[in-house]
Image: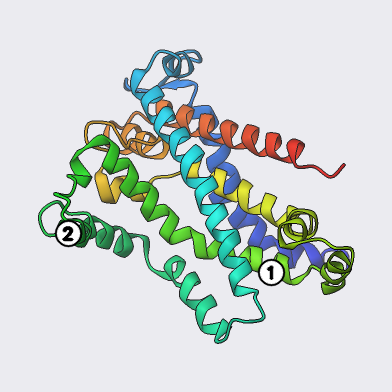
Amino acid sequence: MRTRAPYLFLAPYLILFGLFWAWPVVYALYLSFLNTRVYPWRLDPGLNWSRLLQDPFFFVALKNTLFILAVQVPLMLVLALGLAMALNSALLRLKGFYRFAFFAPVVVGAVAYSAIFRLLFNTEFGAVNAFLRALGHPGYDWLYTPGPAMAAIILALTWRWTGYNAIILLAGLQNIPRELYEAAAIDGAGPWQRFWHVTLPGIRPVLLFCLVLSIIGTLQLFTEPFLITAGGPGNATMTLGLYLYQQGFRSFNFGYASAIGYTVALLAAAFSFLQLRLWRER
């Protein structure tokens, strides 16, 4: 009985894990080999996976997702690192208030903050265009022009997640011994040299953690394109997550949606493995 006790305590978690995570993952893989556009569904292993290679809308969604990944993630991490260093400064007062203030966007519900950004970037009465007009600029049709619409998505993501990553990086900065900075200063290292040779190596694992999480989150991006631009104009802000949703819950093509989902998972695993290899300790 004593040997069974740990398993009895683990049983509720294992049951929920199996029902709501393991089984859906396995079943989605099975669905990706089915033709779900006919009734009853029938096995057709190459249908959905071959369609991925020929679907222009999939490649548009992939291109948009990779563009956001290449622009927004580096921008956000650079801002987060600078913010973390400012929050870690001995000269800053009210540190607790500022940490909460910059972390607060993550606490705000995704629907609420997306609605606010949609209002901010409204062409006629949005605050962003009002500010630009005050400077003498006519403003942009943010939500209905491809370039500005993508910029609005990137700005919204950066606003929400910069503070979150800054708090994680701040924890890494606080674990770097002060003696290392003192020794570097005694050796004649300037601020930039101390940052490059002490700060960056010290937070390397934490920075890698933030990078991998950001890459995975961007590849799954759905909420902001769906609520702010609805994937438009046209398909200018269509992402893989939004395209998966459209195939699965609008077209009810669950087999193809499952193939897209597994493609996203494979891309996330490939990017994560690549980052771990590039950033590994020598």
Q: Which residue is mark 1?
A: 171
**Does residue 233 appear left or right of residue 58 in this picture?**
left
Indicate whether 191 appears above or below 45: below
What percent of the width, then of the height, locates residue 109?
A: 37, 65
**Does residue 176 appear left or right of residue 12 in this picture?**
right
- At horizontal 37% and vertical 17% (from top left) the residue drawn is 55
Are dots 2 and 1 in contact, CB under 8 Å? no
Q: Is residue 60 visible?
A: yes
Q: CA distance from mark 2 to mark 1?
A: 37 Å
- At horizontal 62% and vertical 56% (from top left) the residue drawn is 15
Q: Out of 208 and 93, give the one closest to the viewer.
A: 93
- At horizontal 15% and vertical 57% (from top left) the residue drawn is 133
Choose mark 2 or mark 1, whichever is in front. Answer: 2
Indicate whether 144 appears above or below 126: above
Question: If the image is split into quadrants, where does the C terminus sit?
Answer: top right
Mark 2 or mark 1: whose residue is earlier in sequence: 2
- At horizontal 36% and vertical 39% (from top left) the residue drawn is 242
Indicate whether 117 appears above or below 96: above
Mark 2: which amino acid? Gly
Q: Which mark is residue 126?
A: 2
**Residue occupying the far left of the picture:** 124
**Residue occupying the far bottom of the picture:** 94
Q: Out of 94 and 115, give the one closest to the viewer.
A: 94
Which secondary structure lies at badge 1?
helix
Q: Which mark is residue 229?
A: none
What percent of the width, then of the height, locates residue 199?
A: 75, 60
Q: Characterize the local packing of mark 1: few (<14), some (14-19) or many (20 or more) Cα atoms within 10 angstroms.
A: some
Indicate whether 256 appears above or below 193: above
**Does residue 5 appear left or right of residue 53 in this picture?**
right
